[in-house]
Amino acid sequence: MDNKNKSGEYLDQIEGRNPVSEALRAGRSINKIWIVKNGSKDSRLQDIITECKDKGAVIMQVEKEVLDRMSESSNHQGIIAQVSAIKYVDPFVQIQKVKSEGRNPFILILDNLQDGFNFGSIIRISEAAGIDLIVIPERRSVSVDAHVAKASAGAVEYVPIARVTNLATFIDRIKEDGFWIFGSEVDSAENYQKANYQGSIALIVGNEGTGMSQNIKKRCDFLVTIPMQGKINSLNAAVATGIIIFEAVEQRKQYN
């Protein structure tokens, strides 16, 4: 698939009914859609097709096998769209925007997360919890693609995401701006329910296999963990992130 339109704008691919619907709602520019033949008989697909036509998208009806070959998520649900690439935000502009609204920012930092499904799930959790910003590194990290967009169930359209060249430098800068830094850790850390999440905070989630890098961990003001009662001593990154985020959100409601 060509990854540029006639204006030279980079394009991306999203798959599935919810991701395409949310992209439309969020105002993403849709260049072209591929739908399975006879898909117009499906009322949900027909609504999406009609809206895409209204926005000037090219409609291509193809055999299911064509969509199967194009699909990056292996779950296209009969529709694939070529859209303008997601625009990463400037993290400092986003932080100042939140502060200008009279709120203390709550941001999430992902330290070299690798799994697209985890990332998509974390984006979905973040949207539900009202996280103000997700920050990822430019290198050695998962980025937003069709698989991530699908896993997020469309939430990627609503959560500001920033990419930074150096996570450590970014963390140092926001600490100077009054942020408290929390790191999610498995061992030798405080019970996540006993931490104080007030003020401007950032929660760091590490790599699925190795956790946070030492360079990032040493910048944390607090390390928090989820006590385990069962025989399995670790949780999926997205699950653990959701547990901590919603505890923090509930606590912050009492003071904001």
Image (cartoon, helix red, strand yellow):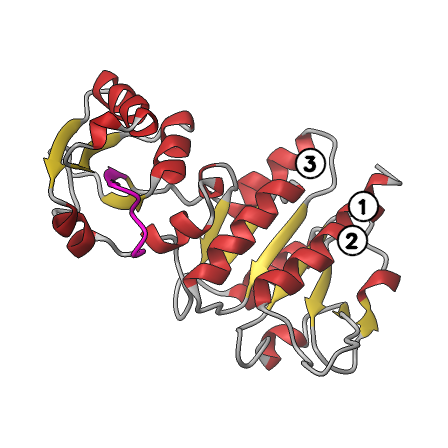
Q: In the visual, does 246 lie left or right of 239?
A: right
Asked if marks 2 and 1 touch (Cβ < 8 Å), the reply is yes
Residue under pointer 2: 247
Q: Position of residue 2 (x, y in %)?
A: 12, 47
Residue under pointer 3: 99
Gap between marks 2 and 1, in whole Å? 5 Å
Q: Classify 10 Å Cα crowding around label 2: few (below 14), some (14-19), many (20 and above).
A: some
The answer, for residue 137, to whether it is visible in the render is no
Residue at (14% x, 36% y) in the render: 37
Q: Over which residues does the magenta segment extend?
A: 73-83
Residue under pointer 1: 250
Amino acid under label 2?
Glu
State the quadrant of the C terminus.
top right
Residue found farthest to the top: 54
Q: Position of residue 201 (x, y in %)?
A: 72, 53
| Numbered disc 1: secondary structure | helix
Q: Is residue 80 magenta?
A: yes
Gap between marks 3 and 2, in whole Å? 22 Å
Q: In the visual, does 236 lie left or right of 248?
A: left
Name the mark nearer the viewer: 3 or 2: 2
